[in-house]
Image (spheres, grey):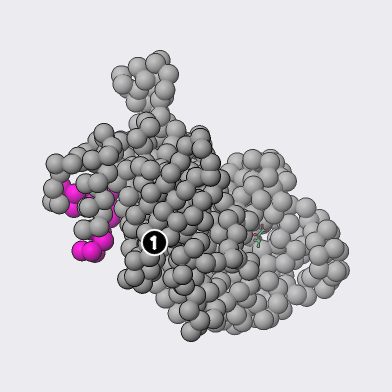
Amino acid sequence: MTAETVKATDTATRSNKDRVLIFDTTLRDGEQSPGASMTLDEKIQVAELLDAMGVDIIEAGFPIASEGDFEAVNEIAKRLKRSTVCGLARAAFGDIDRAAEALKPAEKRRIHTFIGTSPLHRQFQLQLDQEQVYERVVATVTRARNYTDDVEWSAMDATRTEHDYLCRVVEAAIRAGATTINVPDTVGYATPEEYFALIRMLIERVPDSDKVVFSTHCHDDLGMAVANSLAGVRAGARQIECTINGLGERAGNAALEEVVMAIRTRSDVLPYYTEVETPTLMQASKLVAAVSSFPVQYNKAIVGKNAFAHESGIHQDGVLKNAETYEIMRPEDVGVRSTSLVLGKHSGRHAFRDKLKAMGYELGENAFEDAFRRLKDLADRKKHVYDEDIEALVEDEIATSSERAKVIALTVIAGTGSPQKAIITMDVDGVHVTKEATGSGSVDATFNAIREIMPHDAKLALYQVHAVTEGTDAQAEVSVRLEEDGKIAVGRGADVDTVVASARAFVSALNKMSQRRRKSAPGEATLRAG
Ligand code: KIV
Ligand code: ZN
């Protein structure tokens, strides 16, 4: 059966009971990955894309955790058009009240409250006995229901909780008004058979289980998060909690793109459906990889660079004769465009504008002119300009166009003789400043020269380079993560010259760090041109 016939059959036989709700927690559990923190603007960008993509519920943050989390949930709540916005809260009144406050502007809001139910969590983390946890569940779910009639309750570490006790607390949560019951495999310990049996047991034993939606929340410590989530759905769960690229605590959560495509592709054995518009998956993956600076592994299912690449002769031969010989999904169904070599130095503004439109970009006039100038420059320096090149260039332009400090020119003296030297000219608030510095290697020298212009105490937590396309003239895409006083800022830059891309990424991260400093201490001149 072809993908087309599968889709047609699906549409004809769909019923609401087979619909699986997709609950994305990239901005909450995903952001809890060490080092994956995102700025407010980045979170809004991700949330708006998930909303447009048809994700049912977006967990936008943990409002009591920090001012930044509160603001993110609140801003996202103002903006979303289709999705329900969700805020996380521990089993404490203060948490629930804060989540409710952050969610106020949302058209559709959900409070998600949780407590550890396993013996390990009760005894060591909470120092509460079974009855005390039970009472907290009743009190906090009731509190949340006073704010909204969409309340999710999670039994943290459910997969290691005594079954009888789990049934009791789930029953209590339902009676107190929870409308979604989430069954987390918090430590990624369950196997698919066990997880299936657990969800089935709860649905069969708990009174009124048919009045609520059961939800899966599986971590990937043993690489079984997606398999467990799907087993949960087969057992009767109708919500999957997941993240783009599988981002999340430790080994991450079930990957959204994998559960969605598994359900779509294997509807013969998984007769369910989601409302996610799958051609947006690749764009979402790229956006999350960029803002979190967690690159996607090349062989990652669905969105990896190699997921639709056929290298061996025998595979290429088969795919050319009939794509279905080696492809179980159509690349375009997940948003993979076939690479085309499109623009060159003779291309005009019109062709560039059309190309950007086809790629889903809309730039303001100034950003467009800057991007066009960079395209011409790139076409002069690089033999072939591919879609990926344009994407890297435009993403870089979007990320840096409103920044206060910019790289204008850079010269490095590199090679075997040391130390290496860098001379950099930057525009800081409209003033051109030139400084030079030495270092061990050209990147180090460049960063030292930038430090002369933008003094700071930030530590370099990550420096990552990746080639956008093949060949020695490929553009380099550099990610830089800085840390200062517990705050994190991520910058990206692209250029055919790796050192220039590094400088752009470093300056972008410093701009963001200085923006954060200004926010936490308004009035302080933090961007110093030295
Ligand atoms: O993994 C987990 O248990 C969680 C809960 C807060 C749902 O993330
Ligand atoms: Zn989790």
Q: Is residue 2 left or right of residue 47?
A: left
Q: Main secondary structure of the magenta part?
A: helix
| Residue with the mark numbered 1 | 434
Task: Say which of 352 and 444 sits in front.
Answer: 444
Residue 186 seen anywhere in this rendered image of the structure: yes
- State the SS at label 1: strand
**Label 1 Cα neighbours within 10 Å, binned few <14 / some 14-19 / many ≥20:** some
Q: Residue sitting at 68 percent across and 41 percent down?
A: 222
Q: Residue sitting at 66 percent across and 57 percent down?
A: 183
Figure check: 31 above or below 143 = above
Q: Is residue 165 left or right of residue 88?
A: right
Figure check: 331 above or below 242 = above
- Residue 245 % position (x, y): 51, 48
Q: Which residues are magenta?
A: 351-368
- Residue 74 % position (x, y): 49, 76
Q: Residue sitting at 46 percent across and 65 percent down?
A: 453
Residue 46 is inside the magenta segment: no
Residue 352 is inside the magenta segment: yes
Q: Residue sitting at 53 percent across and 44 percent down?
A: 419
The yes-or-no answer for disc 1 within 8 Å of ligand 2 is no
Task: Say which of 472 and 433 sits in front.
Answer: 433
Task: Say which of 19 and 335 sits in front.
Answer: 335
- Residue 472 % position (x, y): 38, 32
Residue 266 seen anywhere in this rendered image of the structure: no
Q: Is residue 90 left or right of residue 349?
A: right
Figure check: 142 above or below 278 = below
Figure check: 118 above or below 470 = below
- Residue 529 % position (x, y): 44, 70
